[in-house]
Image (spheres, helix red, strand yellow):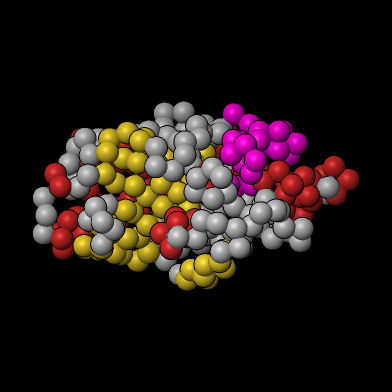
Amino acid sequence: MALDAGTGSIRAVIFDLEGNQIAVGQAEWRHLAVPDVPGSMEFDLNKNWQLACECMRQALHNAGIDPEYIAAVSACSMREGIVLYNNEGTPIWACANVDARAAREVSELKELHNNTFENEVYRATGQTLALSAIPRLLWLAHHRSDIYRQASTITMISDWLAYMLSGELAVDPSNAGTTGLLDLTTRAWKPALLDMAGLRADILSPVKETGTLLGVVSSQAAELCGLKAGTLVVVGGGDVQLGCLGLGVVRPAQTAVLGGTFTDNKQCTLSEARHQLPITPFRMPS
């Protein structure tokens, strides 16, 4: 079973072992605009987890199979959307991919290091500041210090789904690369970027590659989503990167166009772009 947390909806899709689609459960979700916070688009953690569980149950029902026949479950999601957790592992805040509340913080960050900070971020991570996690964290430090002080861990939305199923926290490079905090070369966090921005660097989750075993479905999650407790939970990734893999776009000079709420033109390149085009890690090391 694959969970796909898109901008406009959540889907649970069951495939057979040869990659044929067997059944789908789908539900639209809406993101929350915070009053008096222009550009805000918060991700409703409680409601959206309920919708995800409903989709998993719907997919199982539509497939007409018992949960014990699900070999494993994994998740992909919109990129750039982030989730914060407190030190007890409770998700406390999340935003969707195009949350644009931190426009002023983007401008503030661009002035750092004699106006070279964004270029330093880009050279290391392939990301610009516009939708990265750095200005969003700075916005929280400025305007929601209660949340910022509580934050113990950061993940992407796909990782949140895997965590809700298994209780295990980790990120994968293909999706976490869109935070603007992951080194493109090493596929590891670059905490110095948070240090340079005057932000805490102690909130970075373990990094695990896509396809790695993360854990198993917990008894509590099984009761909610209909899967069998003990079902394998596998590290997922960014929606477009995994879409490219499914299309066989895995070599330099290949291109894929993937459409959803947004349309992406993804290319495999040998060298970095020189014009601030966002670059994200592929789903596996090259």
What x and y, as percent, mark residue 207? 50, 35
- Inspect the magenta stretch and tell me whether residue 253 lies in it: no
The total number of labels drawn is 0
- Inspect the magenta stretch and tell me whether residue 181 lies in it: yes
Residue 129 shown left or right of residue 13 in the figure: right
Residue 74 shown left or right of residue 117 in the figure: left
Question: Which residue shows up at 73% across the image and 39% down it?
Answer: 197
Q: Residue furthest right?
A: 114
What x and y, as percent, mark residue 36? 59, 60
What x and y, as percent, mark residue 143? 63, 46
Range drawn in magenta: 176-202
Magenta span dominant secondary structure = loop
Of residues 18 and 258, which is closer to you in this image?
A: 18
Query: In the picture shown, does residue 93 fall above or below 201?
Result: below
Residue 181 can be seen in this image: no
Question: Which residue shows up at 45% across the image and 70% down it?
Answer: 260
Residue 250 shown left or right of residue 52 in the figure: right
Question: Which residue shows up at 74% across the image and 47% down it?
Answer: 123
Of residues 198 and 266, which is closer to you in this image?
A: 266
Of residues 120 and 212, which is closer to you in this image?
A: 212
What x and y, as percent, mark residue 171? 48, 40
- Assign the C terminus to one quadrant of the image: top right
Of residues 280 and 140, which is closer to you in this image?
A: 280
Question: Which residue shows up at 36% across the image and 35% down it?
Answer: 214
Residue 215 can be seen in this image: yes
